[in-house]
Amino acid sequence: MYEIPVSKIQESLQQCYHSALNFWQGGKYAAEKGGLHIAVGLWILSLEEVGKHVLLQEAASQAGVDGVLRVRVRDFKNHVLKAEKGQALFKQWGIDLEQVGIPLTNKTRTGLWFVTWDENKSTFRREFERLDPYPISKAGALEELVMLGLNRVQKMQQASPVVT
């Protein structure tokens, strides 16, 4: 169990935003160089960083009088949970990432990134078909929508500066 002072919640917003932005920037660079599969994976990680802050914010809202939020390590490191929470926050803002048609999951990211052995076809492969059909337009739409969400996160961060 991570026990984090509630006073650190604004710091988590700042850190998660910057991490998410860096993943988005890396994805943009990869897409420009033709690595759509890498870009999509980085944008999924960007979404997970936003979801991490949501997870911490939810834990902070349930903190006791001791001023400590408690979050299970397993949840803090859970890619699926963080992606879902990030997507849900974007959806609350009217940014529907599902419309892109790419499952924004850890399974998609790892399938696109890592070589696996296909026993049925007796060959090594990556799961590029996860982006089919129309991978260029899907990736472009995902890039834009994630940036829209990150712009909202940035406004949250600016409205609540970290107190040091």
Image: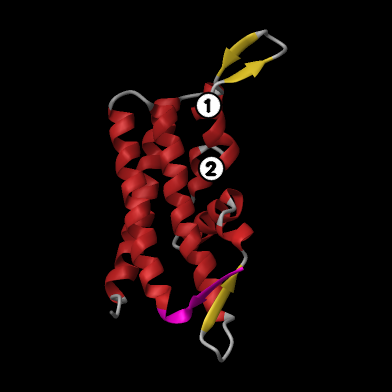
Quarter of the picture containing the C terminus is: bottom left
45 vs 11: above or below:
above
- Residue for point 66% across, 15% down: 118
Q: Secondary structure at mark 2?
A: loop
Quarter of the picture containing the N terminus is: bottom right
Amino acid at pointer 1: Phe
Q: Quadrant of residue 106?
A: top right
Front label number (1 vs 2): 1
| Of the image marks 1 and 2, the number of the one nearer the N terminus | 2
Q: Of all residues shown, which one is farthest toward the bottom?
A: 65
Amino acid at pointer 2: Leu
Q: Is residue 4 magenta?
A: yes
- Residue for point 63% across, 58% down: 74
Choose between 22 and 31: the one closer to the eye. Answer: 22
Residue 56 on image: x %, y %: 51, 69
Residue 49 on image: x %, y %: 44, 55
User: What label sits on residue 104 in the rendered view?
Assistant: 2
Q: Which residues are magenta?
A: 1-7
Q: Of all residues shown, which one is farthest toward the top?
A: 122
- Residue for point 45% across, 51% down: 47
Q: Which residue is mark 1?
A: 114
- Residue for point 56% across, 54% down: 77
Residue 31 on image: x %, y %: 33, 30
